[in-house]
Amino acid sequence: MQFSYEVNDSYAEVKSVGRLNMVAAPKLREVVAEVVAGGSSRVVVNLAETDFMDSSGLGALIGCLKAARQAGGDLRIAGVQPQVKMVLELTNMDRVLTAYPTAEAAFGDD
Amino acid sequence: MTRFWTRLIVLLTVILGVNYVAWRWMASLNWDAWWIAVPLVLAETYSLIDVMLFGLTVWNIKLRKPPPPAPADATVDVFITTYNEPLDLVMTTALAAKDIRWPHSTWILDDGDRPEMRELAESNGIGYVTRGADWTPDMPRHAKAGNLNNALMVTSGEYLLILDADQVPEPDILDKTLGYFNDDKVALVQTPQYFINVPADDPLGSQAPLFYGPIQQGKDGWNAAFFCGSNAILRREALMQLGLVGYVKATEKSVRRALAASRTAIRKARRSPEAGNPLVEQMLNEVEAATESAQKELEARASLSEITYRVRRKVDDAVRTLVAADFSALQSDLEEIAAMELAHVGESGVTTVARDAVDRMSGRDWSPLGALESVHAVLDAISVERTDEAQPIMPLATISVTEDMATAMRLHGLGWRSVYHHEILANGLAPEDVKTMLTQRLRWAQGTMQVLLRENPLVQRRLTWGQRLMYFSTMWTYLSGFAAVVYFAAPIIYLTLGILPVNSISFDFFIRFIPFMVVNQLLFLVAGHGIPTWRGQQYSLALFPTWIKACTTAARNVWFGRPLGFAVTPKARQSGGPSWSLIRPQIIVALLLAVALVVGLIRLLAGMSEPLGTLVNVAWVAFDLVVLSVLVKAVLYKGFVPEVVGPERPEERNADAV
């Protein structure tokens, strides 16, 4: 699992590549905390190259959402793959998170 | 073969039991003394249902074969939960946990946040976890469930072995149990709780051989083996899924509730003195517009993060615009003053001050909206951050002081399976004095009743009927305190007043009652393979004040939000002499029973009562006194003194049974 991020004018994009599971979940939390602490509280987690996610990964996303919101921003997800979509539906998390097609679209209306 | 006999005796028990109790209701009640006749027949009905639920449990006893080997790459975190136990006790467990053969990480979860504990853990290469920064003093802590939920967020093993601070694990505990998880749907493997500091006659009734035996094996047969808080292995994925589902449910509920409350809150705010300010009035209009459109989006099934984000955004923007407009008026005044005075206040200085002030005054707490508490609360609740909990994801259930039962029930509700592994793989310490024992029993009973009242298993649609009844069965047993009172009162009333709750003690009574009692005891004998169950039967009646207190405090807690008076079970023996005051109600009952015996004999000699009725009731009183006598032994018990050879362990870890 690898995380990288890039800050642009209106949001920061965190790319998650590989398996976002219980091992990678704490790392994601750290990366997003770093991004938010750096002043970008509008965060998109790009999941286009995340081919597997488990409940711990989703849990980390919620933790990151809370961190971003508390800093006055938001966290959104984009580029969801079929397995991730299934996990979102299985846990009803699709009631909470909107999956945007691309990172650019995530903050497109805002 | 045993299964055949067990089922046969269950059937006989049900038939003879219904035969007796139906006759009691229909043909035997002494309506002249309804005030004791009805309670007694209700108590008997309670007991019949109790034994029927026990019969249903053992109907499906599952004797498991050893599981296949576990996948070699399974990762495990071993959690040792502690709050205030002595350091050396925790370290004994922690070092034994470190020596577990399967590769794993060991963690001490210290809710007491003791620096000495941290030091000891670290110097022995054991992980140490305390509550993180999110657990601020205003957040509910949720005792052990909170402790575990906190640790789940900072560890990453696939499986979790949970141990109480006084449960010393065997080195092979994981080798023996991880293999069950090859079945992807298994979320939980529970092993027995066995205590090594208990003498053979078990004066405090610490061992629960019937529960960690036929009852758990029976529940296992219905896919309802319970999680008992310690000596269990859990699948992280299942717990996290539970946490997520719970999070979504809680968030949706709080957003719905907040939106529903917003109309009232705004109306109330409009009537408050602050609403005279045109600025506030405009803000309230904006809030109303935002919440109304959020309500529409909610009906249209938009995602909660979007809905809440837009509400916050709209309200914040509106507040900012309005505050800025207000300030720009103020600022132009200031500028005019500055221009007139031509003093040290430059134009730029004024602007900076004003921008700062707009920022501050637009914040939630500072804006005029902040003064309108009801509106403020509604806006805070329209969020996805679950601001009423320290962390949004709370995998272990927090609806009860015994987190284990509720958690297992929810896991079963999500379709996960559980396993009961009948082999002692950890050696624990039981309370060694009555006070601690009573505290512990009260806590278990309270926790169980909280679950019954908050999430009644009978109405959980995702559970099978077998599972619902297995959970209900355990809850039902904790109602025994009320029945016990009647069983003590009825013979006292007959012997002292001559009032019989039945029409007559006749052949009709004996022919129905005796076969039922015999087959009932036979059922315990056969289902339990002769394990000692008498101690348990004694305590289920003798601790009636504890069971009743548990029911009343749990009901007050759930319905009226009153505290339970919850105490952590102390692990060290409480000092002091015999504490008779702890069992005062039972002593009073025993005295009344003794007085009733004497009065009953006098009445018999005086020809005021019939011999048969007196005989039956004297026998009944004798039985009651034998039941209560366990408490004398318990109060006089001075703690465990190890024998030279040590108490033998039953069935040598049940190695053959698995």
Image (cartoon, coloured by chain):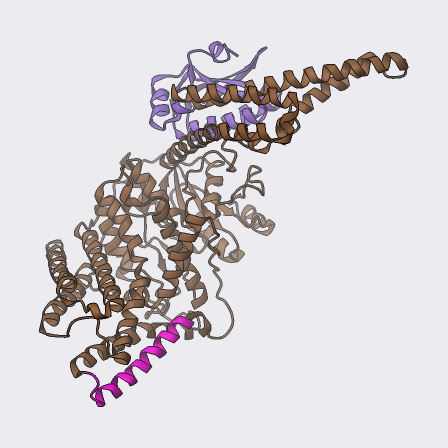
Question: Residue B256's spot in the image, x, y percent?
Answer: 43, 29
Residue B344 inside the magenta-drawn segment: no
Palette colour of chain B: brown
In the image: residue A79, left or right of residue B412: right
Residue nearer the viewer, B252 or B643: B252
On screen, B600 above or below B371?
Answer: below
Question: Residue B430's spot in the image, x, y percent?
Answer: 40, 62
Residue nearer the viewer, B432 or B491: B491
Residue nearer the viewer, B308 or A80: B308
Residue nearer the viewer, B288 or B45: B288
Tell me the chief SS of the magenta region.
helix
Q: Quadrant of residue B495?
A: bottom left
How many marks on residues?
0
On screen, B241 above or below B196?
Answer: above
**Taking the image as drawn, is residue A32 in sight?**
yes
Where are the magenta residues, as a range?
A: B584-609
On screen, A60 above or below B162?
Answer: above
On screen, B201 above or below A24?
Answer: below
Question: Residue B201's spot in the image, x, y percent?
Answer: 32, 71
Question: Residue B108's spot in the image, x, y percent?
Answer: 50, 47
Q: Quadrant of residue B206?
A: bottom left
Which residue is pictured at 50% across the width and 67% down the height? B574
Q: Quadrant of the N terminus of chain B?
A: bottom left
| Image chain in purple | A
Which residue is pictured at 20% across the width and 88% down the height? B607
Residue B608 inside the magenta-drawn segment: yes
